[in-house]
Image (cartoon, rainbow, N blue to C red):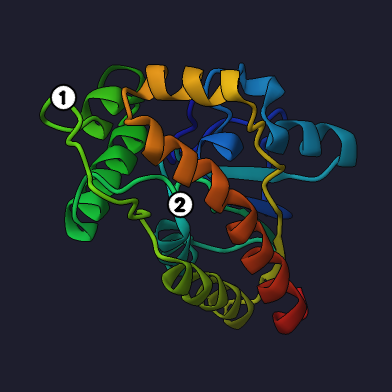
Amino acid sequence: ATDDSGNRRTSRVSSPPEVDCLGDSSTFGYGATDGRTYPAALARLSGKTVRNFGVPGYTSQSAKILAEKIEDPAPVTLVMVGFNDHFPAFRSAREELWTRRLAYACFASRLCSLLFDHLAKPASTTRPELAEFKPSVSPEEYEENLVATIRTLRARGSEPILLIYPSILSDVETRAAVAAYWKHPRHLVDANIDSHPFYQAITQRVGREQGV
Protein backbone atom coordinates (compact mmCIF):
# COMPACT_ATOMS: atom_id res chain seq x y z
CA ALA A 1 0.00 0.00 0.00
CA THR A 2 1.06 3.59 -0.54
CA ASP A 3 0.52 6.64 1.65
CA ASP A 4 -1.08 9.96 0.71
CA SER A 5 2.16 11.03 -1.01
CA GLY A 6 2.31 7.90 -3.14
CA ASN A 7 5.18 6.34 -1.17
CA ARG A 8 5.28 2.78 0.15
CA ARG A 9 4.04 2.61 3.71
CA THR A 10 6.37 1.77 6.58
CA SER A 11 5.37 0.63 10.05
CA ARG A 12 5.99 4.05 11.58
CA VAL A 13 4.26 7.17 10.26
CA SER A 14 5.04 10.49 11.91
CA SER A 15 6.92 13.67 11.20
CA PRO A 16 9.48 14.97 10.76
CA PRO A 17 11.16 12.14 8.83
CA GLU A 18 14.45 10.85 10.20
CA VAL A 19 15.59 8.54 7.38
CA ASP A 20 14.73 8.48 3.67
CA CYS A 21 15.31 5.43 1.47
CA LEU A 22 15.84 5.92 -2.28
CA GLY A 23 15.96 2.98 -4.64
CA ASP A 24 14.19 0.59 -6.96
CA SER A 25 12.02 -2.50 -6.41
CA SER A 26 14.36 -3.82 -3.69
CA THR A 27 13.67 -0.68 -1.65
CA PHE A 28 9.99 -0.56 -2.59
CA GLY A 29 9.66 -4.19 -1.59
CA TYR A 30 8.10 -5.48 -4.78
CA GLY A 31 6.20 -8.66 -3.92
CA ALA A 32 6.49 -8.10 -0.16
CA THR A 33 3.92 -6.91 2.34
CA ASP A 34 4.27 -3.42 3.79
CA GLY A 35 5.89 -4.63 6.99
CA ARG A 36 8.50 -6.77 5.25
CA THR A 37 10.24 -4.11 3.17
CA TYR A 38 13.72 -3.16 4.32
CA PRO A 39 12.69 0.47 5.13
CA ALA A 40 9.85 -0.90 7.29
CA ALA A 41 12.26 -3.27 9.04
CA LEU A 42 14.68 -0.39 9.59
CA ALA A 43 11.90 1.71 11.13
CA ARG A 44 10.87 -1.15 13.37
CA LEU A 45 14.38 -2.02 14.56
CA SER A 46 15.69 1.53 14.96
CA GLY A 47 12.56 3.27 16.21
CA LYS A 48 13.16 5.97 13.58
CA THR A 49 10.65 7.52 11.22
CA VAL A 50 11.60 6.09 7.81
CA ARG A 51 10.17 7.04 4.42
CA ASN A 52 10.24 4.59 1.52
CA PHE A 53 10.87 6.33 -1.80
CA GLY A 54 11.60 3.12 -3.71
CA VAL A 55 10.01 2.65 -7.15
CA PRO A 56 10.39 -0.57 -9.18
CA GLY A 57 12.56 -0.02 -12.23
CA TYR A 58 14.33 3.06 -10.92
CA THR A 59 17.96 3.64 -11.89
CA SER A 60 20.68 5.98 -10.64
CA GLN A 61 19.30 8.60 -13.02
CA SER A 62 15.93 8.33 -11.31
CA ALA A 63 17.56 8.60 -7.87
CA LYS A 64 19.41 11.73 -8.95
CA ILE A 65 16.15 13.38 -10.04
CA LEU A 66 14.31 12.22 -6.92
CA ALA A 67 17.05 13.64 -4.67
CA GLU A 68 16.28 17.04 -6.19
CA LYS A 69 12.50 16.69 -5.85
CA ILE A 70 11.98 15.31 -2.33
CA GLU A 71 10.27 17.84 -0.08
CA ASP A 72 11.86 18.26 3.35
CA PRO A 73 14.56 15.59 3.00
CA ALA A 74 15.41 13.62 6.13
CA PRO A 75 18.78 14.14 7.89
CA VAL A 76 19.95 10.77 6.50
CA THR A 77 19.20 9.20 3.11
CA LEU A 78 19.97 5.60 2.16
CA VAL A 79 20.55 5.12 -1.57
CA MET A 80 20.51 1.69 -3.21
CA VAL A 81 20.50 1.57 -7.00
CA GLY A 82 22.54 -0.17 -9.66
CA PHE A 83 20.73 -3.35 -10.62
CA ASN A 84 18.46 -1.70 -13.19
CA ASP A 85 21.36 0.43 -14.43
CA HIS A 86 23.15 -2.55 -15.96
CA PHE A 87 19.91 -4.16 -17.11
CA PRO A 88 19.85 -4.47 -20.94
CA ALA A 89 18.47 -1.35 -22.62
CA PHE A 90 15.56 -2.09 -24.95
CA ARG A 91 14.44 1.54 -25.10
CA SER A 92 16.25 4.81 -25.71
CA ALA A 93 17.28 6.78 -22.62
CA ARG A 94 14.49 9.28 -23.32
CA GLU A 95 11.84 6.56 -23.64
CA GLU A 96 13.08 4.92 -20.45
CA LEU A 97 12.96 8.19 -18.51
CA TRP A 98 9.37 8.88 -19.57
CA THR A 99 8.35 5.32 -18.77
CA ARG A 100 9.69 5.68 -15.24
CA ARG A 101 8.04 9.07 -14.82
CA LEU A 102 4.73 7.51 -15.83
CA ALA A 103 5.38 4.64 -13.44
CA TYR A 104 6.00 7.08 -10.58
CA ALA A 105 2.81 8.98 -11.44
CA CYS A 106 1.07 5.62 -11.28
CA PHE A 107 2.32 5.03 -7.73
CA ALA A 108 1.40 8.55 -6.65
CA SER A 109 -2.15 8.06 -7.88
CA ARG A 110 -2.51 4.65 -6.17
CA LEU A 111 -2.87 2.80 -9.49
CA CYS A 112 0.44 0.96 -9.26
CA SER A 113 -1.00 -2.51 -8.97
CA LEU A 114 -3.08 -2.05 -12.13
CA LEU A 115 -0.82 0.00 -14.36
CA PHE A 116 2.84 -0.44 -13.47
CA ASP A 117 3.40 -3.72 -15.27
CA HIS A 118 1.73 -2.30 -18.37
CA LEU A 119 3.78 0.89 -18.27
CA ALA A 120 7.06 -0.89 -17.69
CA LYS A 121 6.73 -3.39 -20.51
CA PRO A 122 7.79 -2.68 -24.09
CA ALA A 123 5.02 -2.04 -26.58
CA SER A 124 5.81 -5.35 -28.27
CA THR A 125 5.71 -8.65 -26.46
CA THR A 126 8.64 -9.85 -28.58
CA ARG A 127 12.02 -8.72 -27.28
CA PRO A 128 14.35 -7.35 -29.97
CA GLU A 129 17.45 -9.39 -30.66
CA LEU A 130 20.29 -7.03 -29.80
CA ALA A 131 23.65 -7.81 -31.36
CA GLU A 132 25.56 -6.69 -28.28
CA PHE A 133 24.91 -5.81 -24.67
CA LYS A 134 24.07 -2.20 -23.90
CA PRO A 135 23.22 -1.32 -20.28
CA SER A 136 20.36 1.05 -19.51
CA VAL A 137 22.86 3.35 -17.78
CA SER A 138 26.51 3.15 -18.77
CA PRO A 139 29.20 2.74 -16.08
CA GLU A 140 30.33 6.32 -16.70
CA GLU A 141 26.79 7.69 -16.36
CA TYR A 142 26.20 5.52 -13.31
CA GLU A 143 29.20 7.01 -11.54
CA GLU A 144 28.18 10.55 -12.51
CA ASN A 145 24.64 9.97 -11.25
CA LEU A 146 25.84 8.61 -7.90
CA VAL A 147 28.16 11.57 -7.37
CA ALA A 148 25.42 14.03 -8.34
CA THR A 149 22.94 12.33 -5.99
CA ILE A 150 25.40 12.50 -3.08
CA ARG A 151 26.20 16.15 -3.67
CA THR A 152 22.54 17.11 -4.11
CA LEU A 153 21.51 15.40 -0.89
CA ARG A 154 24.32 17.02 1.08
CA ALA A 155 23.50 20.43 -0.35
CA ARG A 156 19.93 19.91 0.88
CA GLY A 157 21.03 18.94 4.38
CA SER A 158 20.78 15.15 4.14
CA GLU A 159 23.78 12.89 4.67
CA PRO A 160 23.75 10.05 2.09
CA ILE A 161 24.66 6.44 2.75
CA LEU A 162 25.28 4.24 -0.28
CA LEU A 163 24.07 0.66 -0.03
CA ILE A 164 25.59 -1.96 -2.30
CA TYR A 165 23.50 -4.64 -3.94
CA PRO A 166 24.47 -8.15 -2.87
CA SER A 167 26.08 -10.46 -5.37
CA ILE A 168 23.84 -12.24 -7.88
CA LEU A 169 23.67 -16.02 -8.11
CA SER A 170 25.36 -16.81 -11.41
CA ASP A 171 25.09 -20.58 -11.82
CA VAL A 172 23.90 -22.02 -15.13
CA GLU A 173 20.42 -22.88 -13.84
CA THR A 174 19.83 -19.35 -12.52
CA ARG A 175 20.94 -17.75 -15.76
CA ALA A 176 18.65 -20.02 -17.77
CA ALA A 177 15.71 -19.24 -15.47
CA VAL A 178 16.31 -15.47 -15.76
CA ALA A 179 16.46 -15.71 -19.55
CA ALA A 180 13.21 -17.65 -19.64
CA TYR A 181 11.39 -15.34 -17.20
CA TRP A 182 12.36 -12.07 -18.91
CA LYS A 183 12.36 -13.57 -22.42
CA HIS A 184 15.84 -12.19 -22.97
CA PRO A 185 18.48 -13.72 -25.24
CA ARG A 186 20.86 -15.77 -23.13
CA HIS A 187 23.94 -13.76 -24.17
CA LEU A 188 22.31 -10.59 -22.80
CA VAL A 189 21.49 -12.31 -19.52
CA ASP A 190 25.10 -13.48 -19.21
CA ALA A 191 26.41 -9.97 -19.95
CA ASN A 192 23.97 -8.44 -17.47
CA ILE A 193 24.91 -10.78 -14.63
CA ASP A 194 28.62 -10.55 -15.41
CA SER A 195 28.49 -6.74 -15.26
CA HIS A 196 26.98 -6.70 -11.75
CA PRO A 197 30.31 -6.93 -9.85
CA PHE A 198 31.63 -4.03 -11.94
CA TYR A 199 28.75 -1.78 -10.87
CA GLN A 200 29.23 -2.94 -7.29
CA ALA A 201 32.86 -1.83 -7.50
CA ILE A 202 31.84 1.58 -8.86
CA THR A 203 29.49 2.07 -5.92
CA GLN A 204 32.25 1.17 -3.47
CA ARG A 205 34.76 3.49 -5.13
CA VAL A 206 32.34 6.42 -5.29
CA GLY A 207 31.54 5.88 -1.60
CA ARG A 208 35.22 6.01 -0.67
CA GLU A 209 35.98 9.05 -2.84
CA GLN A 210 32.94 10.99 -1.64
CA GLY A 211 33.43 10.07 2.00
CA VAL A 212 30.13 8.23 2.25
Residue 103 quadrant: top left
Callout 1 secondary element: loop
The x, y position of residue 159, in whole percent, is 71, 71
Q: Nearer the viewer, residue 143 or 62?
A: 143
Vertical position of residue 36 compared to residue 153: above or below = above
Task: Please identify the quadrant where the C terminus is shown.
Answer: bottom right
User: Which residue is at a point 18% across and 59% down the rendered structure image?
Assistant: 94
Residue 185 as seen in the image, left or right of residue 17: left
Residue 201 as seen in the image, left or right of residue 181: right
Q: Nearer the viewer, residue 84 or 171?
A: 171
Few, some or many residues within 10 Å of mark 1 (<14, 14–19, 20+): few
The x, y position of residue 82, in whole percent, is 54, 53
Which amino acid is tagged 1?
Thr
Vertical position of residue 115 compared to residue 166: above or below = above
User: Which residue is at a point 78% across and 38% down the rendered structure image?
Assistant: 43
Which amino acid is tagged 2?
His
Q: How many marks?
A: 2
Is residue 71 visible in the rendered image? The answer is yes
Vertical position of residue 146 compared to residue 200: above or below = below
Residue designated by label 1: 126
Is residue 12 visible in the rendered image? The answer is no
Counting residues from the N terminus, which is met first, the one under dot 1 or under dot 2? Answer: 2
Cα–Cα gap, marks 1 and 2: 21 Å
Residue designated by label 2: 86
Q: Nearer the viewer, residue 160 or 166?
A: 166
Callout 2 secondary element: loop
The x, y position of residue 171, in whole percent, is 64, 27
User: Which residue is at a point 52% across and 26% down the rendered structure image?
Assistant: 175
Residue 197 as seen in the image, left or right of residue 91: right
Few, some or many residues within 10 Å of mark 2 (<14, 14–19, 20+): many
User: Which residue is at a point 30% across and 46% down the rendered structure image?
Assistant: 100
